[in-house]
Image (tube, coloured by chain):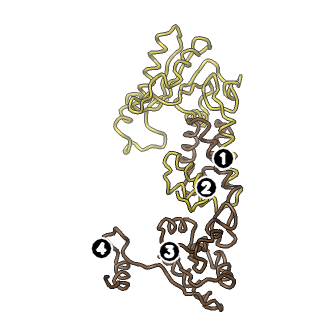
Chain colours: A brown, B yellow
Amino acid sequence: MSAALPRPVSRLIDEFGRLPGIGPKTASRLVFHLLRMPDSQARALSDALRELAEGIVYCQRCFNIAEASPCAICADPGREQASICVVEEPLDVVALERSREYRGLYHVLHGAISPVEGIGPADLRIDELVARLQTEPCEEVILATNPSLEGDATAMYIERAIRATPARARLTRLARGLPVGGDIEYADEMTLARAVKGRSERG
Amino acid sequence: MSAALPRPVSRLIDEFGRLPGIGPKTASRLVFHLLRMPDSQARALSDALRELAEGIVYCQRCFNIAEASPCAICADPGREQASICVVEEPLDVVALERSREYRGLYHVLHGAISPVEGIGPADLRIDELVARLQTEPCEEVILATNPSLEGDATAMYIERAIRATPARARLTRLARGLPVGGDIEYADEMTLARAVKGRSERG
């Protein structure tokens, strides 16, 4: 910013500005907002950031973010041990847990294969997944990558990698079709085509 | 967020979400960005926030934000002591310092009168300005509030408050006219009217 700003202010503007989607204008707006609030708000944000830096580890079994390894899900003997759901991001685990439909284990890849972004299979936790299948009593691997080009390519790559090993788990994908609460009139043609193809008998 | 997220993650999402213009989606995007970066970035942001909470005071003379009171400008004997430039916000001081045209002192109001936002004269540092004029050798008060409805109303209020005291400083306002580098064709009618009214002799 400028010499006329106290160093702590310009320093925080710089730090906020390093976050994605936050330019110098937004950064300085955030800092001046915090200056107008009681100190406690800046302190609470500071403490939360420190806790993130110090208190988050990756579960060494499923690679989800956690407060300790193994994570709460991997450490829970009540979860079905014969099923591994493979997702791209920790937030996908959150979404699936919220659905209350899945009671097995997870494996978090931390991304999807994307040549455009320079992300290859080696950048994801794919080798670790294949290794799990050699040692764990897994009977089904649900490839729950996103229904996108990158997600599909990643699922296909993983499928081939698993088929090349002696592992004999079933490989499945999440169903595609109309979103619940959606409107046929507004569904895109790809979704509608998948919904027709995957139609099921009533009752 | 959800039970499936470690507490430090959901806590930081909540804290980011308390900032203006940052909703839950953006907040979680920021947190997952930080999770992907080396810990040092979250730590640097944490430290900068703590420094802001602990290292910023208001100058008790001009009420600008500073690392100590009096601020660097008030403490500088090289500044013209006979002139006080009244601005709304600390960033206005930054802008004026950048222009290198002003060498006097400042007074930061921390806002402008705005009935819509519920900001009255008592919420601003106006009484403190009037008090300064009784004790300081001020000869000119430049009312450099924004060229907006609120800024003009604030300047007018301050003018009346100062006229009601024995202080005999000159009261001036910043010139209005065409912005340098601007284009007459695109100037709004109010600005153009002020530019004509305030025209000056060549040479």
Q: Earlier in the sequence, mark 4 or mark 3?
A: 3
Mark 2 vs mark 3: same chain?
no
Q: Is residue B192 left or right of residue A100?
A: left
**Residue A47: mark:** 1
Give yes or no for contact between labels 1 and 3 (Cβ–Cβ under 8 Å): no
The picture places residue B200, in percent across and down from the top left corner, at: 44, 28
One can see residue A113 in this view = no
- Residue contact at pointers 4 and 3, CB within 8 angstroms: no
Mark 4 to mark 3 CA distance (whole Å): 21 Å
Residue type, label 1: Asp
Q: Distance between the residues labelled 1 and 3?
A: 34 Å
Q: In this view, does A11 lie above or below B147?
A: below
Contact between labelled residues 2 and 1, with CB atoms less than 8 Å apart: no
Q: Name the disc covering residue B7, or none.
A: 2
Percent across and percent down for residue A105 are 59, 74
Inter-mark Cα distance, 1 to 4:
47 Å
Which of the two residues, B135 or A179, is positioned nearer the viewer here? A179
For disc 3, the marked residue is: A146
Given residues B199 and A105, the one toward you in this image is A105
Determine if marks 4 and 3 fall on one subunit. yes
Residue underneath mark 4: A184
Q: Alpha-carbon neighbours of circle 3 within 10 Å: few (<14), some, or many (≥20)?
A: some
Element type at mark 2 = helix
- What distance separates the C-alpha of mark 2 from that of mark 3? 25 Å
Residue closest to the far front: A78
Distance CA(mark 1)–CA(mark 2): 13 Å
